[in-house]
Image (cartoon, rainbow, N blue to C red):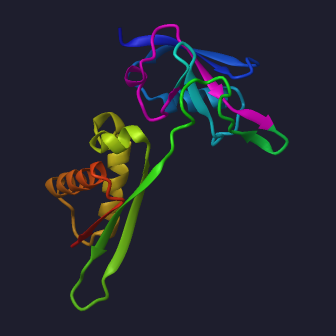
Amino acid sequence: MTEIVVTFQTKDGSAEKTLNDVLLDSTLKEAREAVQMFLGLPENTPCQLVLERTNEVLMDNLTFREAGVKQGDKIILNYRRSHSGVVYVPSETSTSASPPSLVTYTFSLTILSDGKQPKNYDYPIELTDFYESNPQRFFSDYNAQERQNFIAWLQEIVPRAVQNFEIDKILRDWCDDISVGYRITALKI
């Protein structure tokens, strides 16, 4: 089965939206954004997703399949309205740890050119514990947008065409550095 039915519900139960024909390989983020828009929530509202069946916090960039979402599951949108808008609130009932912390890793590129001052460019990413342990998955096929963003950034700042094998090597080296805990990976070209 590649399609499932999933219900998204606000934490207080005041609103819900059932999505039919959800592709298992689509991301939770895509569905969350659609549901938030349907429910009239601001587009960039911070929101924690909790799988009701397991009370597990789900990462936005995972697919439904990777997150273990099954047919008929309910996902809780964890936020609270305030006078100034919508504010993220961690679940008091959650047995899992607090929301995943993000750690910033930076790819620092120095471009050397003949007779000119070198130019430095930084490309930061924020990773959860899962991606710190599996950084190559952050840029893999199911999360291709992150890879495309990085390639677009490289193509924009490097004064020549960057070949695919060079991109693969840069990402492989950066992922190796992340997996051993280096917060900054530097390269000069």
- Give residue 168's position: percent from left, percent from top: 19, 51
Query: In the image, is 161 to the left or to the right of 124?
Result: left
Residue span colored magenta: 57-81
* Residue 144 drawn above or below residue 56: below
Q: Does the magenta stretch include residue 8?
A: no
Q: In this view, does 181 lie above or below 72?
A: below
Image position, residue 143 (x, y; %): 35, 38
| Relative depth, front residue between 132 and 77 | 132
Q: Position of residue 88 (x, y in %)?
A: 68, 38
In this rendering, position of residue 16 left or right of residue 162:
right
> Does residue 82 lie above or below 6 as drawn?
below
Q: Count every numbered label the image shows and give the total.
A: 0
- Place of residue 152 in the rendered image (x, y in percent of width and height, measured from the top left): 34, 56
Image quarter in which the N terminus is found: top left
Point 62% across, 35% down: residue? 47
Quadrant (top left/top right/bottom left/bottom right) for the C terminus: bottom left
Which residue shows up at 17% across the image and 55% down it? Answer: 169
Q: Quadrant of residue 42?
A: top right
Residue that appears at 37% across and 24% down: 66
- Figure check: 174 above or below 56: below
Residue 104, quarter of picture = bottom left
Image check: 56 left or right of 35?
left
Q: Quadrant of residue 52?
A: top right
29 on left or right of 184: right
Q: Residue furthest right?
A: 83
Q: Which residue lies furthest to the bottom in this view?
A: 115
Q: Is residue 78 magenta?
A: yes
